[in-house]
Image (tube, grey):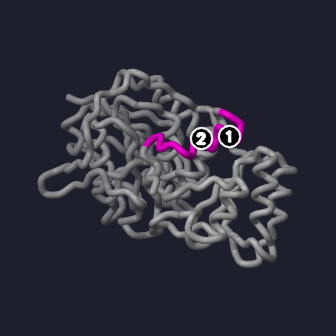
Amino acid sequence: MKRILMINTGGTFSSRPGPSGLAPELTGGEIAAQLGGGIASVKLEVEDYCSLDSANIRPEDWSRLALRIGEIIAAYDGVVIIHGTDTMAYTASMLSFMLQNPPIPIVLTGSQLPLGAPMSDAADNCLCAIEMASSGYSGVFVAFNRKIMLGCRTSKVRTVSFNAFESINYPNVGEFNAFGLQLNLRRDNPSPLFRVQEAYSDRIAVLKLFPGMDPDIFRFLQEHGYEGVYIEGFGLGGVPFLKGDFTAEIRRASDAGMPILVGSQCRYEGSNLRVYETGQRILECGGIPVHNMTQEAVVTKLMWCLGQTKRREDILRFFQQNLVQEVSFS
């Protein structure tokens, strides 16, 4: 019988209605009790990490979760993390980088309705996560709406639908149907080099461009100690280079040692800075392309990289590598 640890962090899944709206209250033990016979096929143990609306999850929580998983990973066949949906994709992406070569499945899940609410998706999502955590396929995953997605490719794309999450620019790695869990994964031999690299820097900024945006914001960010910037440009990754010239500020910041990442505001199909003049100018000025990564993966990879090194050249090399299947290079 597989031994699975379920870590409860709160979110809608464990919420109850109160005078100020839904708030997470259920303990891991109460969640396990409500799942009942659905977990009879595994030895499920529970641990309460916190009880938070995931809007309140912070980078230090990612670091502590990674360290905790590192402490217990040898004792379990899989880990399930109950998490609020609002920032679950960020947590899944960051754990993908912090947990280097995990030997077991680590599966995040949550729900759009609280456990116990009429028509709730909570129990089904959790049972799917437990099944994936029992699969023996190592890595960090998200289980939601009977889909299994890589943690570093997942984004929340809908606010109220049960089909709230999608795998962006990458196929789902599994799904549940009438024959059970169907996986499209290769079972690699686990690397003996598992380690936790929990260091990070949260001194980054994300700039979503709009027509007329003032590029002077770069100077503000540098003066206030920010260490990296991700620009969500237009279309394939374009930025203004005539009036309100962003490329000049990208060059100035890059020359000063600040990594400036550039991608697209479009969620699907990714960016390509080699097609248009604006993109070529970005590259010439030192902008670092992020290709088809999710915003969550770009943010967490940049934070994680800055925890390992402050040198722009090293950050560039990290973003030229596909570390955990977070990016495809066209």
Q: Which residue is drawn at the image coordinates 67% and 55% (left, top)?
A: 287
Q: CA distance from mark 2 to mark 1?
A: 6 Å
Q: Is residue 133 left or right of residue 231?
A: left
Badge 1 amino acid = Glu
User: Dot 2 corresponds to which residue?
Assistant: 317
Badge 2 amino acid = Arg
The number of discs equals 2
Magenta extent: 309-324
Looking at the rendered image, the quarter that the N terminus falls into is top left
Q: Nearer the viewer, residue 58 or 90?
A: 90
- Which x, y percent locates residue 306? 67, 39
Q: Is residue 283 above or below residue 32?
A: below
- Which quadrant would residue 309 be assigned to in this image? top right
Looking at the rendered image, the quarter that the C terminus falls into is bottom left
- Which x, y percent locates residue 143? 34, 51
User: Dot 1 corresponds to which residue?
Assistant: 313
